Amino acid sequence: MSTAAPAPAKSISKSQFVDSTELLADPAALQARAAEDGYLFFKQRLPKDEVLAMRAEMLAIVEKHGWRQPGQDALGGLIDYDAINRLTEEEMHRTDVGVTADAYHDVQKIERFHRLPHHPRLLEIYRTLFGREVLVHPRHIARMVTPHTCMVPTPPHQDFPYIQGSAQTWTCWFPVGDCPKPLGGLMVLRGSHTQGYLPVQPARGAGGFAVPLCPSETEWMEGEYEAGDVLTFPSHTVHKAARCQFKDRIRLSMDVRYQPIDEVVDNSSLNPHCTLKWDEIYANWQSDDLKYYWRKLPLKLSAWDDGYLKPRQRIC
């Protein structure tokens, strides 16, 4: 094995996402782009009014907990910097989503939060991509990035060590509201999925681990997100969040996961992304059709492997 020093890092390249909407009519072309780039981006894929309705419900919870500046309409995301920073770092670190556990539990109880991932315009993406029926993971994640001093951007990482199951599990990330670059949207490292699983090292930020990057890994894709835009990528694609440049705003987004229904899934992906039980989440829902929907499916469960989150050196 060579012990030569790595080559000097190339300058970081940032390019705009390529919209793949037109390829939904051509499954082979969509699959080919996914295989080459390791991500797909769809402009205005979700109805804007439904995304903004979700935003209003999430912001109502932020206001309930006393962190929102007064005098805004239902969609305004201005945060009271002093109020949010009265929270201790321990209170903020009970979850990695930017708010306290109590506030996050309130979000997890929103029926719309669990219904939006089943939108037909999202399911169409994955049915076209997989060429077969789709499992929507019930474990949805909200990111509510506030200007608390303990918050740091999500470091470069892959989702596979946290999800496991099928490597064909795709993350769907979308902002809940407009997300211009200075607000700190998600970026993906183009083509990084082709390397498979990469070793991790401890890091600050969501997840607690990062993939150490090699000098040649510089081709980051980014975008000026609007409400309704959708970014999706497989679980081996390296991605990270840009740093928010504001001290008075919240960045709201959702992480949802999809996979072919006939591939293995880890059991943890069927649990809530919090300490609540499903019965507690469902308590005040108006409809029953999505309650425990995965229990009716012939799923193949896989065992969790702790080894993926054991720190290892990466050889570039």
Image (tube, helix red, strand yellow):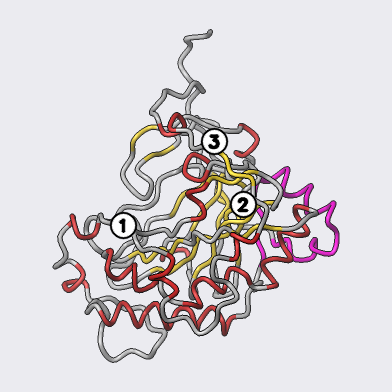
Q: Which residues fall within the magenta stretch?
A: 19-42
Which of the marked residues, 1 or 3, is nearer the chain's N terminus? 1
Residue hosting label 1: 95
Quarter of the image where one finds residue 307: top left
Q: Nearer the viewer, residue 105 or 208?
A: 105
**Percent from the top left, x then y, of residue 142?**
43, 64
Q: Residues within 10 Å of mark 2 (few under 14, many from 20)?
A: many
Which is more N-terminal, label 2 or label 3? 2
Q: Earlier in the sequence, mark 2 or mark 1?
A: 1
Distance from disc 2 to disc 1, alpha carbons, whole Å, reads 23 Å
Quick one: 223 or 118, which is closer to the camera? 118
Q: Image quadrant of residue 91?
A: bottom left
- What is the count of numbered marks? 3
| Three-letter amino acid code at the position of disc 1 | Thr
Would you name the residue on which mark 2 appears?
A: 170
Is residue 201 in the magenta section? no
**Dot 3 surroundings within 10 Å: few (below 14), some, or many (20 or more)?**
some
As drawn, is 238 to the left or to the right of 207? Answer: right
